[in-house]
Image (spheres, rainbow, N blue to C red):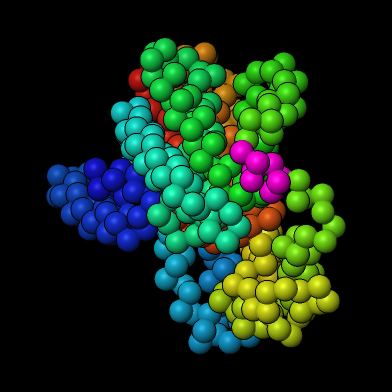
Amino acid sequence: MFFLLGVGCVPGIGVANIFLALTLACTIVWRLSARGRGEDFLGPFRRTTPLHAPIGAFVLFSVLSCFFSTLPSRSLIQIKGFGTFLLVVFAAALLDDEGDVRLVIDLWRTTALYLVLRGLVEWLAGANNLGERVSGGLSVYMTYAGLLLVLVPLLGSRGLSGGRRGARLADAAVAAAGALAMALTLTRGAYVGLAIGLLAVLLVARPRLALAAPFAVALFFVLMPLAVRDRLMSVTNPKDVTMNDRVAMWKAGGAMIADRPLFGVGPGRVKALYSGYRVPGWVEPRPGHVHNNVVMIAAETGIPSVLAYLAFVGAFFLGAVRIVRRAPRGDPARGVALGAIGAMAALFAAGMFEYNFGDVEVLMATLVVATLPFAASRASRAAD
């Protein structure tokens, strides 16, 4: 139960960490008690998913990069953060049946509703410009948009799946409201991510409907507030300073990779070293990251590490699409897999413009949503 509450508390990282710490303590007590009854101590933790190996490789290469860092004493402090990736192991072990998976989604539906209402209140109160943007009570608007990129496709895809009509309509309504709230953040990368996530769900679930995607985007553009349309149109402006700054960041990150391809400059070192790699056109003198998952991971922890990250993404999509193809309509695992595909596609696309794999709140949701299809599929098979 503590695990379910922990992964459901994505808007509050402090609360989530407390529940997850309680999860670890309770799990140790639970498994010690099980061993006392003659059961295998590791038991449920022997369950694996296609994600275990690439995530394990990613953590291994990232930890090694701390020792080969440009300043090991600074990078070694970052090792404690890699414990977040244990969420893949815990999700696979503790989401034991269909009820557990359903409870996670129910908690996230409540979370999405809270985020939507909080965001709309902020928008109406005046957080409707680039100087003051909707953040849903979180630390920054990009984290808010990133969490909605997980929740909106996960809930919205259930409208394409079987199940009770009332539940499907409720999920679709929350997802639509979440899409509106995300649009109000004026975050262009999130717009791209949501469009790609929608397209991915349609291509896997109903390929013919994918032809309607351009019309849906056009309708979205027409109905959105003027501030959102202006923000979308700024993508075509060659003088847009934020886009030019991102290009400068990517070039600086590329130079770091060229200098230290195997283990990168070290976790926590990009900001400190950025001034030595800046190229003409830069705006932010010392950014904390380079606004791109692939470039940032490679620059910070090396090419082997980013290959492990890409293997994690690839393993997820191969496994989740296989679950959708094999599951009959009406199977809960199919709806969960479709939603996870939309969420992961959205996050990966948005991650070309933002380092969302390094945002702890978004990362926690990412790791759990990536594991959900495999837990749901196992539970569905066990119920047959």
- Residue 252 drawn at (x, y percent): 76, 73
Q: Residue at x 74, y 85 (%)?
A: 276
Position of the N terminus by quadrant: top left
Q: Main secondary structure of the magenta part?
A: helix
Q: Residue at x 46, y 72 (%)?
A: 79
Camera-side residue: 144 or 380?
A: 144
Whether the magenta-drawn stretch holds residue 240 is answered as no
* Observer-nearest of 373 and 144: 144
Q: Is residue 347 above or below residue 80?
A: above
Left or right: 221 as drawn, with respect to 320: right
Nearest to the observer: residue 308 or residue 138: 138
Magenta stretch encompasses residue 229: yes
Residue in the image at 61% along x and 38% along y? 225
User: Does the rendering let one see residue 308?
Assistant: no
In the figure, is residue 347 to the left or right of 231?
left
Residue 28 location, x and y as percent? 23, 56
Q: Is residue 70 visible?
A: yes
Mark count: 0
**Residue beneath the point at 76% across and 74% down:** 282
Residue 136 screen position, x and y as percent: 43, 50
Q: Where 148 falls versus 266 (above or below)? A: above
The image position of residue 10, as x and y in percent, is 39, 50
Q: Which residues are magenta?
A: 225-232
Q: Is residue 35 left or right of residue 123?
A: left
Residue 363, above or below 71: above
- Which quarter of the picture shows residue 280? bottom right
Quarter that holds the C terminus = top left
